[in-house]
Amino acid sequence: MSKTTFKAHTDIALIKYWGKKDEKLRLPENGSVSMKLSELFTTTTVDFSFELTKDVASINGFSTEKELQRTSKHLDRIRAVAAKQNLPMAKAKAKVVSENNFPKSSGLSSSGSGFAALTLAASKAVGLDLSQKELSILARQGSGSACRAVCGGFVEWKDSDTSEGSFSETIFPATHFDIRDVVVVTDPGPKRTSSTQGHTTAQTSLLFQPRQNSLPQKIEAVKTALSKKEFQTLGSLIEQEALEFHSVLLTSDPSFIAIKPGTVQVMHAVLDLRDQGVPCYFTLNTGHNIHVLTLPEHEDQVSSVLSGLSLATNVIRSKVAADPEELSTHLF
Ligand code: PMV
């Protein structure tokens, strides 16, 4: 097949996936719900060629040995599916060039959009024509949140005990509810602990099991708030969820302290804005950068207050993004 390029948006988990019940297959301990973000994305070009003797990959201009190995392992999964269909390029090596338009490894889910774009571009480049379910299952094995990043709008990744059952679907399209996300970059540098590492210690927290017990009900409540477009109910639920999730991180062994002074400064600014009657709520993943959700009519004010904070480096404003897109211009 020919060179293929895909752009996949990252997402913010409204209900987080944390901990895995199967490490190898990346089966999460719980279901999760997320919202795709229009201004945070990865663009990836893949080309398979018999002239290459090994896979080559460049991410944001360079790549570490560890990143190359993870990319190549994911290409092997795609080649294995292609081999079952007797596609000739299943035996070829690939060149991968990938670019994020936002800082990676800083809690903004670059691995989610990265492995989604890689799965979409590589499977098409190798000659496969897969369904969204098949793409989601494949992407999940590269990075958990990539399972959601192959879909658009508001996405649910259902809990399952099998690989075949562990995939994501759009529950509401991007046009359903116009929510705005303002990411405050409080430090463009990488986080201290990766999510991959953190997942392995999730169960050591004494708060892990109580959180698990409450999640099915919380997921239903978030889906209901989304379906009725009740922003304040949704906001309270997702902010509480982020704090419960971080309580698990803080009380794990070893402890996982993801928040930094700039993160806490944003949390207080959000509380102050709410005291003034501005509907806005925060949520964050395993990094120090933090997302603030608000409604369109308050986005300018929220963004201007947050970007003026002494510890804010910059803000990135997103709408809800639709499905990933195939592009006709390539990165090489
Ligand atoms: O996809 P991973 O392995 O990077 O884990 C993501 C975990 C969280 O971002 C904290 C939550 C989520 O559901 O995205």
Image: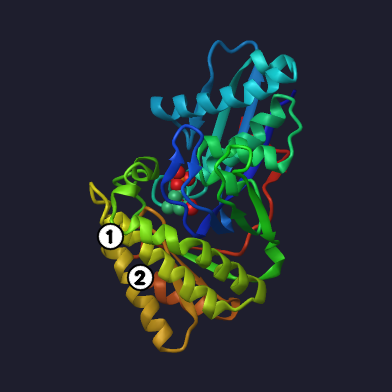
How far is disc 2 from disc 1 in space, using C-alphas?
10 Å
Q: Is residue 196 visible in the rendered structure shown here? A: yes
- Measured from the top left, where is residue 87 in percent x and y? 74, 18
Q: Is mark 2 within 8 Å of ligand 1?
A: no
- Measured from the top left, where is residue 19 in percent x and y? 41, 47
Does residue 137 appear left or right of residue 59 in this picture? right
Q: Nearer the viewer, residue 100 or 176?
A: 176
Is residue 119 shown above or below 273? above
- Give the residue type at disc 1: Lys
**Image quarter of the N terminus:** top right
The residue sitting at 52% across, 45% down in the picture is 112
**Mark drawn on residue 295:** none
Tell me the element at label 1.
Answer: loop
Does residue 62 appear left or right of residue 299 in this picture? left
Which of the marked residues, 2 or 1, is nearer the chain's N terminus?
Answer: 1
**Image quarter of the C terminus:** top right
- Measured from the top left, where is residue 145 in percent x and y? 52, 47
- Give the residue type at disc 2: Val
Quadrant in the picture for residue 64? top left
Residue on which disc 1 sits: 260
The residue sitting at 60% across, 56% down in the picture is 156
- Measured from the top left, where is residue 276 in percent x and y? 42, 89
Is residue 15 shown above or below 96? below
Quadrant in the picture for residue 212? bottom left
Quadrant in the picture for residue 321? bottom right
Is residue 84 shown above or below 11? above
Query: Colour scheme of this structure image?
Result: rainbow
Q: Is residue 64 visible in the rendered structure shown here? A: no
Residue on which disc 2 sits: 266
